Amino acid sequence: MNTSIPLILTTIVTLSTITYTIYSAQLWRTTRAAAEISRQAALSNLWSELNRYVEILRHQEAPELAFLEKVSNLILEYMIADLLTRGRAKNDPNFEEFHDRVLALISENEADASKFPWLARLVEPVRRH
């Protein structure tokens, strides 16, 4: 009886440690995902605010308008590139179909599409992993 009590307590501590480790790993993954979502939301909000400011400057015919429009396009291009990279990395089955449809749409409307430099990110070849 005296030897079984330490064995039972050791088993309980071991099971508790395993359970704690599993849930800690899940919490860590969830926290990383939440941080990434927050980062994307902050960048999106920054881009939206920049575009609001660009519209104000457009009405004022400000000389720095062209520069800020280029900055806005660069931020948009980065956001698109980041989303596309994640879609490719996750081997999303819908991504290849999306890519093909966008490519067809852009090739049908090349004159209009050329006015938007960030669209080039959408037609980059899909890298197979």
Image (spheres, grey):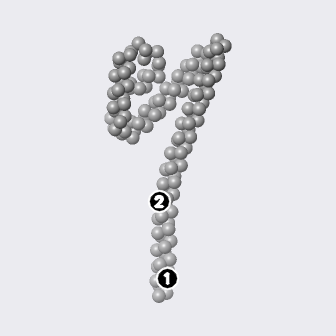
Name the quarter where the C terminus is drawn. top left
Q: List the residue tagged with mark 1.
A: 5
**Marks 1/2: CA–CA distance:** 26 Å
Which residue: 61% across, 20% down? 54
Q: Indicate the position of residue 105 as horizontal and vertical percent values.
A: 37, 21
Q: Label 1 is placed on what type of residue?
A: Ile
Q: Is residue 28 left or right of residue 101?
A: right
Q: Label 2 is placed on what type of residue?
A: Ile
Give the answer, above or below, for where 114 lies relative to 91.
above
Q: Is residue 64 visible?
A: no
Q: Secondary structure at mark 2?
A: helix
Which residue: 47% across, 33% down? 82
Q: How busy is the neighbourhood of tag 2: few (under 14 within 10 Å), some, or many (20 plus)?
A: few
Q: Indicate the position of residue 119 as horizontal and vertical percent values.
A: 44, 22
Give the answer, above or below, for where 127 lies relative to 67.
below
Q: Secondary structure at mark 1?
A: helix
Which residue: 42% across, 17% down? 113
Q: Is residue 10 left or right of residue 68?
A: left
Q: Which mark is residue 22?
A: 2
Give the answer, above or below, for where 16 lies relative to 60.
below
Q: Is residue 99 visible?
A: yes
Do the numbered discs 1 and 2 sit on residues whose CB atoms are within 8 Å?
no
Q: Indicate the position of residue 73 as horizontal and vertical percent values.
A: 53, 22
Q: Is residue 101 left or right of residue 12?
A: left
Q: Indicate the position of residue 78 as horizontal and vertical percent values.
A: 50, 29
Q: How busy is the neighbourhood of tag 1: few (under 14 within 10 Å), some, or many (20 plus)?
A: few
Q: Which mark is residue 119?
A: none
